[in-house]
Amino acid sequence: MMSLFPQMESPGVALMLWVLACLSGPSTGFPNGKVTEACKTMMPLHGHSLPQRFPRHTVEVNVTEFKPGDRVKVSLSGPLFEGFFLQARSAENLEGPAIGSFALADRKRSQVLTCGRVKNSAVSHTSKSKKSHLDAYWIAPRDAPKRIQFLVTVVEKFRVFWVKIPGPTISQSNTPTLATPVVTEVTVGTSLPVSHLTQPFSALDCGSNKFCVRNPSDCDPGARNCFFLSFKRDHVDLIVVEMSGPSDGYIAFALSNDQWMGGGDDAYLCISDSHHVDIKTASLTGRAYPEFDSEPALDEMSWRLADGLIQCSFRRRIHFPALQGRFNLDANYYIFMADGEVSEGGMIHKHYRQPLITDGKFNVTGPAKDIGGSRSPLLIKIHGALMFVAWMTTVSIGVIVARFFKPVWPNSLLFGEEIWFQVHRALMVMTVLLTGASFILPFLYRGGWSDQAGFHPYLGCTVMALAIFQPIMAGFRPPPQAPRREIFNWLHWSTGTTARILAVVVIFLGMDLPALNLPDPWDTYTMMGFVAWHVGTDVLLEIHGYCLIHKVQVLEDDRIQILQSITTAEAQGHTFKKTVLFIYISGNVAFLITFLTAIIKV
């Protein structure tokens, strides 16, 4: 006989301990760079360690003077270090708050943090990997003090660090302050963006006189959760575009020939900066910063900021034969919609969640339509759904049956094998098949390996390998009385339990990836509820089994009505187990339906 996954004692307890270990962080230190707790003091929380006295790392800048809106390159270099924390402060008040905001030059090794109420006002590491040089760009705010000094904390290793290493001081120039680059880039020869929109856009003509994209579907453009985009032909060669959405940074849409943003796509952005909206056009190439056009060639631009919404509208020509980067609108394109944050000075940051993408290509100048879209690609949705079915339902039920239901059907056979084993094997084979089918979908979607998903793909590959190894190992299962049978049992149990625990961790990590991005923190709490549900059922059946054995032992000691009493106790125990199994399966199905519904909606 072949058994695919673990059936030895206390897998539930092991599952809970492993999950808690994976979800819990260290009590001190921040290897992931999330050091906002140290915003004021810039002191690492490394226990009672004291900072070093003589710094070995230096901070350099590329200018000595600045104007509001300028981008100043800041470079940190020195011997190998693990972590750092960079801020700009007023040179007259180094104990004061952070000044200005930062943009990243290396997103893999550095990240921006929010200190106080100033977004992106500090830069830190993303991991404890060794590094010797890092660059970032400081953006001078409009209300910057006359003199700015850069400060940095550097961590060489846990107990070796320097705090507030003084960097260079730069001064605000005496020349008149010019408009920031973001504003000057918007200037066009035909019209400037003017705030004369007085009310939200209307969706009444969607599908009849306007081509509309809405998310959620059929939402009201005035609602705070509605992303809205419409196209309406205004002339033979002119089209009016309206766009709105909830954001305090920017909203944007892009036209693309494929479902990958960045292949020279045609983008339009409405950027909110200091109670003003700049309307820009840009070309998107790879993951690089958008290439903004100096002359967007848009007419009648207008905007409105109200109720947490950004609204903007403009007219553009349908055909641009001489202007590179702008698509002709009388062709079929995928339509993207995105939103994100803006630093002081109008610098945009990458959207923090997956953009909305239409399900197919559309011609916005063709027949009017009212369509929606999805922030999660279909292949990724199927990937997530299959993994939920495999590791929340089939494997969990299969393990429970193998662990606790052998005595329930001791002599009942199904196709020549005991019932519990046939049920267990069928569920585990289904788990392996579902996992294998799900495993290949992200590779089909990405066209290869993804470096943007953190530990999720690495642990996922480990789970896939363990899932394949289990049935192979079960095929060489020694006979029940063989000397190596106990070694096999422990190896089989530990491999299966490790696979289940890692699968839960992989699901936790995958739920918050941009490609799926289930509602947060709902997804985390619901998944924790499922883990507690499974562990609770496991513990309940363990306690019940212990009590049943104890009861039978007492009856044997009394030697009174032994056979009848033992048979009755066992029958009652089997009924209890069957009831628990029915409730457990019902709960698992409820959790599964909840997650599948959430996947469909994203």
Image (tube, rainbow, N blue to C red):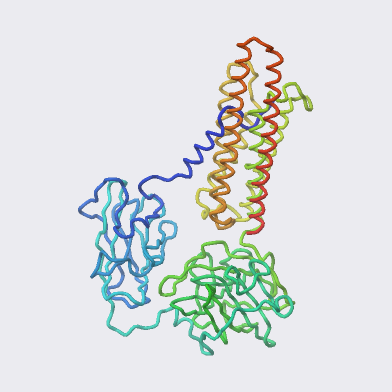
Splitting the image into 4 quarters, where does residue 183 fall? bottom left
Residue located at (60% from left, 15% from top): 554
Q: Is residue 381 visible?
A: yes
Q: Position of residue 601 (x, y in %)?
A: 65, 59
Image coords of residue 333 (percent x, y) = 66, 71
Q: Nearer the viewer, residue 11 or 563?
A: 563
Camera-nearest residue between 572 and 464: 572
* As drawn, 203 above or below 547: below
Q: Could you tell me which quadrant the C terminus lies in?
A: bottom right
The residue at the far left in this view is 53
Q: Residue at x 66, y 51 (%)?
A: 596
509 sits left or right of 231 in the view: left
- Assign the N terminus to one quadrant of the image: top right
Single out the residue that lies furthest toward the top: 559
What residue is shown at x 55% (from left), y 39% (from top)?
501
- Please indicate whether residue 357 sits to the left or right of residue 91 in the image: right
- Above or below residue 372? Residue 415 is above
